[in-house]
Amino acid sequence: MTTILRLPGDPAQLTLPALLLRNAEDHGDLPALSWRTDAAAGWTTLTWSEVRRETAVLAAGYAALGVERGEHVLMMMTNRPEHWLSDLALTHLGAVPVTVHGTAAPEQVAHIARHSRSRLAIVEGARELGLWEPSLADPGIRLERLVVTEAAQAGPHRTYESLKRHGFPGSLANLGVLEKNGGVLEKRSLPRAGTQERTDLFEKAWRETRATDTLTVVYTSGTTGEPRGVRVTHRNVLLNAHALNRLVELPDHVEHLCYLPFAHIAERMLGIYLPVFRASHVYLCPDPARVGADARELRPAQFFGVPRVWEKLAAAVRTALAALPAQRRAAVDAARETAHAHVACRERGEKPSAGLEAAYRTAKERVLDPILALAGFDRLVWTASASAPMPPDVADFWAGFGLVIMDAWGLTETMGVATTNSPAAFRRDSVGRPLDGLELRTAGDGEILVRGATVFDGYLRADGTVEDARDAEGWFATGDIGRIDEDGFLRLTGRKKEMIVTSTGKNVSPAHVENTLKEHPAVDQAYVHGDGRPYLVALLVPDPAAAGDAADLAEALAHAVAQANTRLSRTEQIRRYRVLDGEWGPVTGELTPSLKLRRTVVQERYGDVIEELYTS
């Protein structure tokens, strides 16, 4: 829990702009936002007072473009300062920033532009323009203008106007505007705001904002169907931040490595809202491929990754361990056994004995931390995951270094986290207990229901109204299936709509079977099928590190399936399987942007292969 912060009011009545003012007044000289202009450059940093000043200037620029209170402004950029600061600037105007994922297909971009009724979009460069210009030309979409952060990339055939003289700060001067006027793309002269006029506009606008106003709309990618717009208020976010902050002891002004897309509620909370709440320091990492290098340099005290990220990091460390000399590897194995014993003791709610505590401290200092330092993880005090079930073998691997990945659960509709493990109380096979202020229960079919002030109030309709998704008593049906144990810990068993019902009427959670398969190092990704069928089949993507002799790989995968089947019930066991080439991902379509498996896409894409598994 951060104890140095002054809350400028009741948490239920706070707004994000009120907290930014608090940061500028109380922590103005401390670093707030850092980024690189390129991979080889050093970090450029803004303090909290500079962030607020830049935000005010950007707000004036967007006001000059006609942005009004309550309207949605779309953004498609990587994790760059223009994105982060524009988000705050629009919020201070009372507008609603909406980030569209960079991997969205053109039809998804058009759907969001149409559904949100936005008149303005802020995009990064030439690639994004190719996705957005069709929406400018579509008479059924209200989009009138594109602001471009890398205008030079668009080429000389398009007309842009630099917005530097309209109030955009020198550090973000490479902005341009492309406008639709009667079907023609052209530039426009804009009035320039004076310093006092700009200040008056900024201060007046944010003070009119209320806690119940919309802070953002997050379009959930979902595993099927068109994206739905989740309306998120200042109150939803800041009460969630307040509850999360009370759970974890973090250093004051803790740093955060921001690499997940802002289109996800996870990075919106971790990379924008919680840092403003905690007055912490955000390092922007626009290229996820560089997150490892940045972590090694920054040695962060906290790190969040979806299970896929933790899996890849674990695979890299395993490879390094395998290359150690036998004597050194034996020392590491012994230290890991001590760390496992220490974690298990804490998990049972027991205080480690003096002997175990001393052995663990020695093992960590002399053996484990030097290995973690190679990944920049030797200073970690908080590690977390969410979005999808954490494979038990991955959680167990990191526990061998004394790192307990605090698995959490929630949806965009619950601000990303509804339940979480914490250092004071955790079960590694669970997703923790509900946050303060949230109620949790299960329906007769096992579906998890949540109620509380951090649960959203509905989905945005195309006409701008909100469709309340809660029942008459305020409960939101999450679509996830689970059970709550006697100690209040939630354990997930699957998605209601994804549950497999075999032809014999047996219910099977595909996520459970897939995670069991992926515990074998040879299996990187898995899809299980069997709805309406007499038995289950699987599609397997091998781990790239396991690639080699075809016969050896085939034997390893056969062993993986056989090993999984020994731990599964008869109904859950895999009868037949097929090995596929190529990793699944958001770009190829099998995973959502938040790295969840799109089951319908896999089923449709490999329908013939699945059918052969049942007929050949």
Image: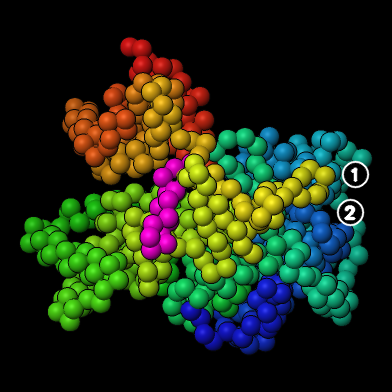
Q: Which mark is residue 454?
A: none
- For the point 24% across and 53% down, which residue is it? 318
Residue 590 seen by the camera: no
Query: What amino acid is at disc 2?
Result: Arg
Count of residue discs: 2
Circle 2 sits in a helix, a strand or a loop, which is it? loop
Q: Main secondary structure of the magenta part?
A: strand
Tell me which segment is drawn in magenta.
Answer: 482-495
Badge 1 crowding class, 10 Å Cα cut-off, few under 14, some 14 to 19, many 20 or more, is few
User: Residue at the location (86% across, 35% down)?
Assistant: 139
Q: Earlier in the sequence, mark 2 or mark 1?
A: 1
Compared to 328, does 136 lie above or below? above
Q: Is residue 412 visible?
A: yes
Instruction: Residue type at mark 1: give it.
Output: Asn
Query: Residue beneath label 2, please?
Result: 188
Q: Residue furthest left?
A: 327
The answer to whether 181 is drawn above or below residue 232 in the figure is above
The foreground one among 438 and 35 is 438
Q: Which residue is mark 1?
A: 181
The answer to whether the residues at label 2 and label 1 have Cβ atoms under 8 Å apart is: yes
Q: Position of residue 575 (x, y in %)?
A: 28, 24
Front-most of residues 42 and 179: 179
Residue 201, magenta (yes or no): no
Q: Looking at the figure, which quarter contains the C terminus?
A: top left
Q: Secondary structure at mark 1?
A: strand
